[in-house]
Image (cartoon, rainbow, N blue to C red):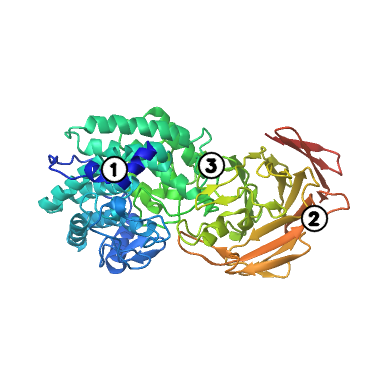
């Protein structure tokens, strides 16, 4: 199927498939995907302030404002200012090779029109303001500059689906106040989008069995609701529902994790599930999946502050928000509400996702003090191969398992906050389509706090998105003791090649320290062990002390190390807060010859002469064929504890 599709592009048959023609016009039916006004004054103020920034400074694109669509054509690349071909069939535009104009994600991000939803909200809230006229001009320029199948903004079916979701909200909020000819033009482009989604199904079904399939399916379902009189609307709906059901069941596991091993993509797909539920008549298992996916991120602590930005990050959104683009808590809160969970009423003011999309809180919503267990998580939780611990001044995440898509080579990574400030932080993504040294420099094991036998990578990068190897991690149930919390896990990513080895890690969190005990099976397979400890950009290194603000934390157990910050070749010592950005950050790089090693942060007692023994605790791992068992012995009392990861 894929071969035939590629042959069609190269032979020119795509011109026949996508040739425009006379199509019967159908007026759009309003689909309720948005509230007409928010439930809080805070959300109202955020919207109007954001709308003002859109008109003054442009649309948001990866942490910056861009003139694309505002004072420059919609085909303008926000990164370079150059223009993608506007009057050329999309399949003839090069977006992949080294000769391409730019990273296409930038122009696509602007063209998702979430900021136009913000303007439509502002026009609804403030009818005498400049918002409606500005929105009219922007939509009219789009309709004139992006005719069906012409230009880079028709290249991706997913982008068409996301734009349809945005336009549905715009028509609901302001359709009765927009010029009639503009509404007709929008409706014709939406119908052309449905036709495009159908023609592109061979490509979607053969090559995009991921979030793209969910998004394309969601687009067909939505457009079938918007245009119920269209000749093929019933077929769009039936096909979209089948595609959506087939992919989401592959996409989400019962514990709420997703095949895309990424915080950003988890939020992205979570918002797709949210839209499907808001469209109505969602199957019960979709609602259960929505709840599990929301609960997974709640367990990781999204309501306690920012959490590690693991896996690929690109700010992908389905919903529109004037809040922080890096925040994921609002989407999780909305998912919980739509799944039937109660949340604090204050959240309706804090999160645009609740203010503009959730049903009115009414009288049944609890206060923050007596809210449900969802936002009163215990100090130690585990979900989807990641454990989280709160003890004393420490916040720690231990990521043991990985997924097959959009993940990084980070099995058994640890990320640590101390007194609310990041010390060890995930280095982020940097880019997908930019320099390969940046892409690989931030996603490989050399950028993560994991042990590497003989400097090997866990997965070994292949091109921009693929890996040559695979790896699975196994997390044991957390062990919570009066004075310590102990986590344990291991992975098999190095069980290939000439010298296979399994790698295990125990993490101990006490009031005064965090300790890490690393193990190997067999213990003597590697000549040396390398490890990188990526620090947050705000952290500096003074000898063996990590300094952030007024806080100083001692680094213990690394006899010798070097510190790299902002190094270009090889690419090392960087941190990426969002897609397309990277800034210098200190990376501690160390190497040892010990298969079993103890190191940590804080007032960690010195290890004893016996391996893997400190603070009166002795650690021992027994390796089984497909599992590992950690035995922890309190030497003073002789008490032993065991946990098993399989």
SS assignment at label 3: loop
Identity of the residue drawn at 71% across and 67% down: 562
Q: Residue furthest front?
A: 11
Q: CA distance from mark 2 to mark 3?
A: 31 Å
Residue 444 vertical position relative to residue 35 in the rendered view, above or below: below
The residue nearer to you, when weighing 330 against 402, is 402
Q: Are marks 1 and 3 in contact (CB under 8 Å)?
A: no
| Quadrant showing the N terminus | top left
Badge 3, how many Cα within 10 Å: few under 14, some, many 20+? some
Q: Position of residue 47 (x, y in %)?
A: 31, 58
Identity of the residue drawn at 19% across and 51% down: 174
Read off the residue under disc 1. Answer: 33
Badge 2, how many Cα within 10 Å: few under 14, some, many 20+? some
Is 175 left, or right, of 553 in this rendering?
Answer: left
Badge 2 or badge 3: first in the primary sequence: 3
| Quadrant showing the C terminus | top right
The image quadrant that residue 214 belongs to is top left
Is 521 left, or right, of 157 in this rendering?
Answer: right
The residue nearer to you, when weighing 261 against 45, is 261
Q: CA distance from mark 1 to mark 3?
A: 32 Å
Read off the residue under disc 2. Answer: 593
């Amino acid at each position: 199927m894929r071969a035939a599709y590629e042959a069609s592009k190269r032979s020119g048959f795509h011109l026949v498939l996508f040739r425009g023609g006379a199509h019967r016009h159908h007026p759009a039916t309003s689909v309720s995907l948005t509230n007409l006004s928010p439930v809080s004054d805070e959300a109202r103020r955020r919207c109007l302030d954001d709308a003002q920034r859109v008109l003054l400074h442009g649309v948001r694109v990866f942490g910056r404002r861009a003139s694309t669509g505002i004072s420059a054509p919609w085909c303008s690349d926000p990164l370079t200012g150059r223009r993608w071909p506007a009057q050329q069939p999309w399949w003839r535009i090069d977006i992949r090779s080294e000769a391409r104009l730019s990273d296409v994600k930038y122009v696509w991000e602007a063209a998702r029109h979430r900021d136009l939803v913000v303007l439509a909200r502002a026009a609804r809230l403030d009818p005498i303001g400049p918002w409606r006229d500005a929105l009219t001009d922007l939509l009219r320029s789009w309709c004139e500059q992006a005719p069906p199948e012409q230009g880079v903004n028709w290249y991706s079916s997913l982008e068409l689906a996301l734009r349809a979701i945005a336009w549905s909200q715009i028509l609901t909020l302001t359709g009765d106040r927009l010029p009639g000819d503009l509404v007709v033009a929008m409706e014709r482009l939406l119908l052309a989008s449905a036709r495009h989604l159908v023609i592109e199904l061979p490509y979607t079904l053969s090559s995009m069995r991921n979030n793209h399939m969910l998004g394309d399916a969601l687009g067909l379902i939505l457009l079938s609701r918007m245009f119920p009189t269209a000749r093929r609307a019933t077929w769009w709906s039936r096909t979209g529902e089948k595609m959506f059901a087939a992919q989401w069941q592959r996409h989400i596991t019962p514990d709420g994790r997703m095949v895309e091993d990424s915080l950003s993509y988890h939020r992205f797909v979570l918002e797709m599930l949210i839209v499907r539920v808001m469209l109505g008549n969602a199957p019960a298992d979709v609602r259960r999946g929505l709840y599990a996916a929301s609960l997974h991120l709640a367990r990781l602590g999204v309501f306690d502050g920012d959490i590690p930005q693991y896996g690929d990050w690109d700010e992908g959104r389905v919903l529109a928000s004037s809040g922080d683009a890096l925040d994921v808590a609002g989407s999780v809160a909305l998912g919980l509400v739509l799944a039937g969970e109660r949340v604090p009423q204050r959240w309706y003011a804090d999160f645009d996702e609740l203010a503009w999309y959730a049903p009115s809180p009414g009288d049944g919503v609890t206060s923050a003090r007596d809210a449900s267990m969802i936002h009163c998580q215990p100090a130690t939780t585990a979900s989807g191969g990641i454990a989280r611990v709160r003890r004393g001044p420490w916040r720690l995440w231990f990521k043991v398992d990985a997924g097959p898509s959009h993940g990084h080579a980070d099995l058994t990574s640890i990320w640590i906050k101390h007194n609310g400030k990041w010390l060890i932080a995930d280095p982020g993504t940097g880019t997908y389509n930019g320099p390969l040294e940046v892409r690989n420099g931030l996603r490989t094991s050399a950028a993560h706090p994991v042990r590497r036998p003989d400097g090997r990578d866990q997965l070994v990068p292949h091109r921009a998105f693929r890996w040559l190897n695979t790896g699975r991690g196994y997390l044991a149930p957390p062990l919570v003791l009066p004075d310590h919390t102990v986590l344990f896990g291991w992975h098999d990513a190095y069980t290939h090649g000439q010298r296979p080895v399994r790698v295990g890690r125990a993490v101990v969190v006490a009031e005064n320290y965090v300790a890490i005990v690393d193990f190997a099976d067999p213990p003597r397979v590697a000549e040396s062990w390398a490890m990188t400890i990526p620090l947050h950009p705000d952290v500096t290194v003074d000898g063996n002390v990590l300094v952030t603000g007024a806080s100083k934390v001692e680094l213990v157990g690394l006899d010798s190390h070097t510190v790299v910050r902002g190094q270009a070749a090889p690419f090392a010592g960087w941190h990426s807060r969002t897609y397309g950005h990277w800034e210098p950050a200190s990376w501690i790089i160390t190497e040892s010859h010990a298969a079993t090693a103890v190191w940590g942060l804080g007032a960690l007692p010195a290890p004893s002469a016996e391996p893997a023994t400190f603070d009166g605790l002795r650690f021992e791992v027994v390796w089984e064929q497909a599992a590992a068992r950690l035995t922890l012995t309190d030497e003073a009392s002789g008490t032993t504890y065991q946990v098993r990861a399989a």
